[in-house]
Image (cartoon, rainbow, N blue to C red):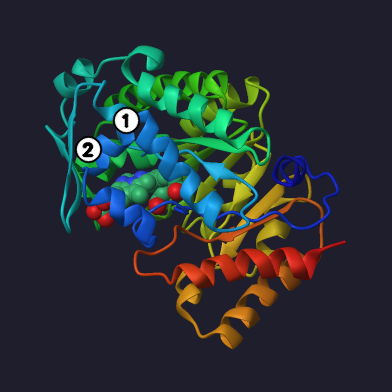
Amino acid sequence: MRFLDACRRKPVDATPVWFMRQAGRYMPEYRAIRAKASFLEMCERPEIAAEVTLQPVKFMAVDAAILYADILLPVRPMGVALEFLKGEGPRLAPPVRSPKDVARLRLFDPNEELGFVMETLRLVRRELAGRIPLIGFAGAPFTLASYLIEGGPSKDYRWTKLMMHGEPKLWDALMGKIAKVTSAYLAAQVKAGAQAVQLFDSWVGALSKEDYERRVKPWSDKVLAAAKKTGVPVITFGTGTTPFLESFAASPCDVVGVDWRLPLAQAWKRVGSGKAVQGNMDPVNLFLPRPELKKAVRAVLKEAGGRKGHIFNLGHGILQETPPDNVRAVADWVHEWTAR
Ligand code: CP3
């Protein structure tokens, strides 16, 4: 299959394409279901989560499906309450800031506590019947830690950085627990049917190169190494990674996801030729009129230069008001223009 072959840098008949956040509010079919259930209810009900996972697959020619779930789901079995507030994003309570807070976090069995995710994976695999592969995912330790410590989204990551620098032992204890939980969670997803896994480090770009290398990379690498052991291709994705892309890419993974801040050829040079690269069109380009959108897609493909191991994707997730027809057109163009 194209996507899995590209992950392994094998030859493909056309460049594979999928979109981060391909299931979501930009699709009318999604909003119809969402009108009747909360986001967390949708994740917890495998028939709904499976249906939503498959919506973009039915709508357009993507080369992979990605599990409908969220990077924050594991915080609840760890003992932290999670809500999604309209217009404000996720709220986690209580925030994890003291030694007592960290000690209280539970390690859990993902098959028991997040069994609905495993059931969703099994349902989707059955429905896909081998047509395209299914990607599982988890949040990377830094991004998860930032939500746990801040209690929600943050602009400056103040509490997170204060713990990292002020209480390095506590930081390591927290990152150790997150790494353990996440490694087990990804292994369970592969057992349940995930054919590749992606680690999302969406906010890692808030860090300096030095802090990333010293305080974060060892923990991300632990999770990636555990994921590698399952035998499926492993993708590591971050945004704002330009200052430390070499170190970010020098991890136990097959594919490196990059944002749009570097032209793809430059990014790939820094990642190294031994890895596949996923990306990297700016999601905002999906709002452009067709001629300009075509140019933006062509630009990414030109940068990739037909090299083995390119997976076309965005530099970050699809934005909420994106016109669905533009997304579908991009998937078709990528296939048409790269057919060999
Ligand atoms: O890519 C996919 O289609 C798979 C599903 C997926 C979701 N979230 C569904 C979702 C994936 C891979 C994620 C990952 C995720 N979740 C990340 C990392 C990727 C990234 O975009 O940076 C992060 C940081 C989160 C945390 C999170 N979940 C946020 C910040 C939000 C937005 C809150 C808001 O109100 O806008 C969510 C909610 C969320 N996750 C939605 C979806 C489809 C929207 C839920 C809804 O219908 O209201």
Which comes before the other along the chain, label 2 or label 1?
1
Mark 1 Cβ and ligand 1 under 8 Å apart: no
Residue at mark 2 to residue at mark 1: CA–CA distance: 28 Å
Pick the front one: 58 or 92: 58
- Dot 1: few (<14), some (14–19), or many (≥20) neighbours within 10 Å? some
Picture residue at 64% right of the left edge, 32% below the top: 129
User: Please, what secondary structure does the residue beneath circle 2 have?
Assistant: helix
Say which residue appears at 15% left-offset and 27% top-offset.
98
Towards the viewer: 280 or 241: 280
- Residue at 32% across, 30% down: 45
Q: Give the residue at mark 1.
A: 45
- How many marks overall? 2
Q: Nearer the viewer, mark 2 or mark 1?
A: 1
Name which residue type carries label 1. Answer: Arg
Q: Is residue 220 above or below residue 155?
A: above
Queried on whether the Cβ of the residue with tag 2 lies below 8 angstroms from ligand 1, the answer reads no
In-image side of 84 versus 231 (left or right): left
Mark yes or no: residue 228 visible. yes
Whether residue 140 is visible, yes or no, is: no
- Image quadrant holding the N terminus, namely top right
245 vs 6, left or right, is left
Give percent across and percent down for residue 241.
Answer: 51, 55
Residue 340 x, y percent position in the rendering? 88, 61
Q: What element carries label 1?
A: loop
Looking at the picture, how far across and down is residue 14, in whole percent?
Answer: 79, 57
In the picture shown, does residue 107 fall above or below 38?
Answer: above
- What amino acid does circle 2 point to? Ile
Residue 188 on image: x %, y %: 49, 19
Which residue, given by chain and number where applicable, does mark 2 sit on? 149
Q: Do the residues labelled 2 and 1 touch (CB within 8 Å)?
A: no
